[in-house]
Image: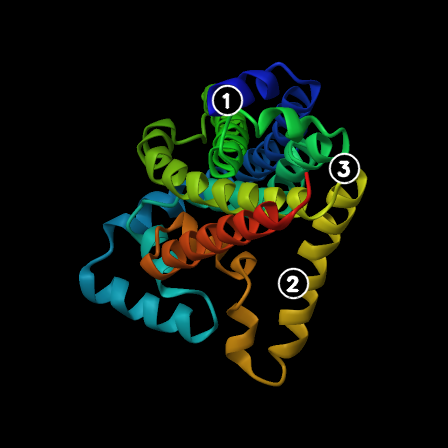
């Protein structure tokens, strides 16, 4: 089921749209950062190198100062250790605004379209509902994650033409970034499929899915004024820490992925398809 789903999605126009839009956004941010670095005579890339040469005491002092201003300790430590160069940090920060929406766009109709057209009545005579849902999730995740890998690979290759681009350090950091991105895409894939099971009309799945991201973010931001920890309830508040492979951030994204999948199972089981 997952193989057929992934094959169908790879050949879709939306998968190509995902790659092109993400490439334009991330490439534009990366290009702007590199051009700024060139104007600063490589000060940004030099900073990424110099911080790795700090002593343990100097690093601890910087971490204490930065974290007291609100920056997560895991992110600061990853930057100082060279695992999260400033160029990657900037590109990944921009990714948090565009990738969730692209994931929604690619997969919002994968289940709702089947339900609306009654195609599920035919499919579910041959496979269990659990297998059907997992196939949709795995196929959607594979396409989304591979699209991200393609874009990152193109950007790394293109960045090699700039003198200020620290190719060796960037390439060394990419495997860690991809681990975080795998969890990032999985969480938003399961989020998308939850909304896809809730509505038989694909447009409603897309509309409420997008509205949900903004509404939850706005709600947690508002509630954080009354009780600060509520500002970290939504997985979107753990994005940056995920790139640093903060264990708590990994647990948050994994928990949301499991929760969205479980809720999708419950909804699909109770739906009259």
Q: Which mark is residue 217?
A: 2
Q: Which residue is mark 1?
A: 150
Query: Closer to us: mark 1 or mark 3?
Result: 3
Q: Is residue 155 above or below residue 187?
A: above
Query: Closer to us: mark 2 or mark 3?
Result: 3
Q: Are marks 2 and 1 in contact (CB under 8 Å)?
A: no
Q: Position of residue 88 (x, y in %)?
A: 46, 40
* Relative to 155, 83 lies left or right: left
Task: Measure how far apart labels 2 and 3 are at the Cα level.
Answer: 23 Å
Q: Residues within 10 Å of mark 2 (few under 14, many from 20)?
A: some
Residue at 51% x, 40% y is 185
Q: Position of residue 86 (x, y in %)?
A: 45, 45
Q: Is residue 230 above or below residue 2?
A: below
Query: Closer to us: mark 2 or mark 1?
Result: 2
Between 119 and 199, which is closer to the camera in this rendering?
A: 119
Q: Earlier in the sequence, mark 2 or mark 3?
A: 3
Residue at 65% x, 44% y is 197
Task: Measure how far apart labels 1 and 3 are at the Cα level.
Answer: 27 Å
Q: Residues within 10 Å of mark 3 (few under 14, many from 20)?
A: many
Quadrant where the image shows the C terminus: top right
Q: Which residue is mark 3?
A: 202
Is residue 22 at all visible to an observer of this figure? yes
């Amino acid at each position: 089921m997952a193989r057929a789903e992934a094959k169908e999605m790879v050949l879709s126009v939306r998968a190509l749209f995902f790659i092109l839009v993400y490439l334009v956004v991330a490439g534009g941010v990366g290009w702007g950062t590199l051009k700024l670095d060139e104007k600063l005579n490589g000060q940004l890339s030099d900073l990424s190198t110099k911080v790795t040469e700090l002593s343990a005491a100097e690093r601890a002092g910087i971490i204490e100062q930065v974290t007291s201003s609100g920056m997560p300790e895991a992110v600061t430590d990853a930057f100082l250790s060279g695992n999260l160069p400033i160029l990657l940090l900037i590109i990944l920060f921009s990714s948090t605004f565009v990738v969730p929406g692209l994931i929604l766009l690619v997969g919002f109709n994968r289940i709702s379209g089947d339900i609306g057209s009654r195609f599920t009545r035919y499919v579910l005579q041959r496979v269990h509902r659990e297998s059907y849902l997992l196939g949709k999730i795995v196929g959607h995740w594979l396409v989304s994650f591979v699209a991200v890998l393609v874009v990152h690979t193109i950007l790394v290759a293109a960045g090699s033409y700039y003198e200020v681009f620290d190719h060796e350090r960037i390439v060394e950091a990419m495997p860690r970034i991809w681990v975080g991105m795998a969890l990032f895409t999985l969480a938003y894939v399961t989020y998308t499929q939850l909304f896809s099971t809730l509505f038989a009309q694909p447009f409603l799945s897309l509309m409420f899915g997008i509205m949900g991201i903004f509404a939850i973010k706005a709600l947690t931001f508002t509630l954080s004024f009354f009780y600060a920890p509520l500002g970290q309830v939504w997985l979107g508040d753990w994005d940056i820490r995920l790139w640093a492979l903060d264990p708590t951030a990994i647990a948050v994204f994994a928990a949301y992925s499991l929760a969205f999948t479980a809720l999708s199972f419950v909804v699909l089981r109770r739906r009259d398809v």
